[in-house]
Amino acid sequence: MPELPEVQTVIEYLKKQVLNQTIKDVKIYHPKLLKNASVQEFTEFMVGEKFEKLGRKGKFLLFYLSNNKSFVVHLRMEGKLFAQPKDSQPNLPQLLAEIELDDYVLRYYDTRKFGTFEILNTHDLTKLPSVNKLAMDAIDDDFTGVYLYDRIHHLKSKIKNLLLDQSIVAGIGNIYVNEILFDTNINPTREANTLTLKECNAIAHSAKKILNESIKHSGTTIHTFKVNDVQAGGYQEFLQVHGKRKKPCPRCGQPIAFTKVNGRGTYYCPRCQK
DNA sequence: AAGCGGTCCTGTGTGC
DNA sequence: TGCACACAGGACCGCT
């Protein structure tokens, strides 16, 4: 669930608590969380290091540690990373990992256990395949209509699927792709080779507008997105079509349609989006 | 190469 | 009421 704005919100919040904190201890309650290390390897890698810098690429959270090490987290659908007081009670059934710091314990919760932790012995994250295969962020200046057109105009895939492909543009998930395609009047099932450069320009522009606006409002709350137990996600109020099945289209009043595109819930206005 | 379907998970919602 | 099942979806894998 968390997409670029939600991950950005989490990173901004964590910066205030974990920067310059030293890792005292690590507890892993669900070893499958670790994508490229055993529990022992992970613990030895982490303990004693300090959080020097935090960042984000696409939907990945990037933690730059001392000694040129990196720690990379992906929340997938339900992952939550909270810096909580050391004496606080964790929500045990969902607790998959704890990273004990000087003043906080960084707790990872994930009901569906889809999230991942990765470690890397350098700050050069291009060395990590999962991060290296990402394209630029959708809010980057170099995500332009010309770039998008070049990447997709020869493809037959539906435009919605391509905007969800993180190797074409990073950070867009199912909620925002529905919003972006509504905003640009483009039907989610349009084949990419029918899109004009003008439409690609509109998509790039709209993606930046919608994602930046959502970041301003601390992301979107759908189901369970929270930051430190406080409901985040003011952008929820601004969603035009996502989750609005049968509600009137904000532009023309026609009921919003719901269908599946590649298995993903897809909301759109059949009259506006051609 | 491109594109599609299955898989990982479990809490929630729906229908009989 | 209680049960069974569909659904939610990001990334990855394997097949065509």
Image (spheres, coloured by chain):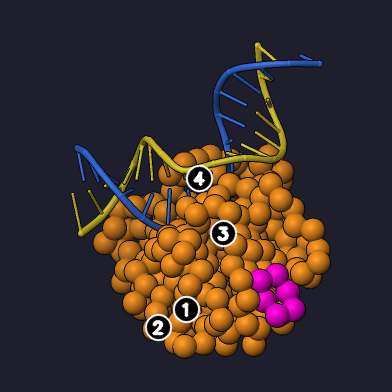
Chain colours: A orange, B yellow, C blue
The span from disc 1 to disc 3 (Cα, nearest Å) is 18 Å
Q: Quadrant of residue C14?
A: top left
Q: Is residue A100 visible?
A: yes
Q: What is the chain letter for disc 3?
A: A
Residue visible at 70% across and 66% down in the picture: A82
| Residue A264 disc label | 4
Magenta stretch containing residue A102, yes or no?
yes
CA gap, disc 4 and disc 1: 32 Å
Real-space Cα separation, disc 1 to disc 2, in angstroms:
6 Å
Which mark is in front, 1 or 3? 3
Identify the residue at horizontal 60%, vertical 41% (top origin): A257
Chain to which the residue tagged by mark 4 belongs: A
Q: Amino acid at mark 2?
A: Thr
Q: Secondary structure at mark 1?
A: strand
Instruction: Please report contact status of discs 2 and 4: CB closer than 8 Å, yes or no.
Output: no
Work out whether residue A274 can be spotted. no
Q: Which residue is mark 2?
A: A122
Of the residues shown, which amino acid type is indicated by label 3? Ile
- Identify the mark at residue A70; answer none if there is no mark: 1
Quarter of the picture containing the N terminus of chain A is bottom right
Residue contact between numbered discs 1 and 2, judged by CB atoms under 8 Å: yes
Q: CA distance from mark 2 to mark 3?
A: 22 Å
Residue A12 image point, x, y percent:
67, 78
Instruction: Tell me which amino acid carries mark 4.
Output: Arg
Discs 4 and 1 carry the same chain letter: yes
List the residue tagged with mark 3: A28
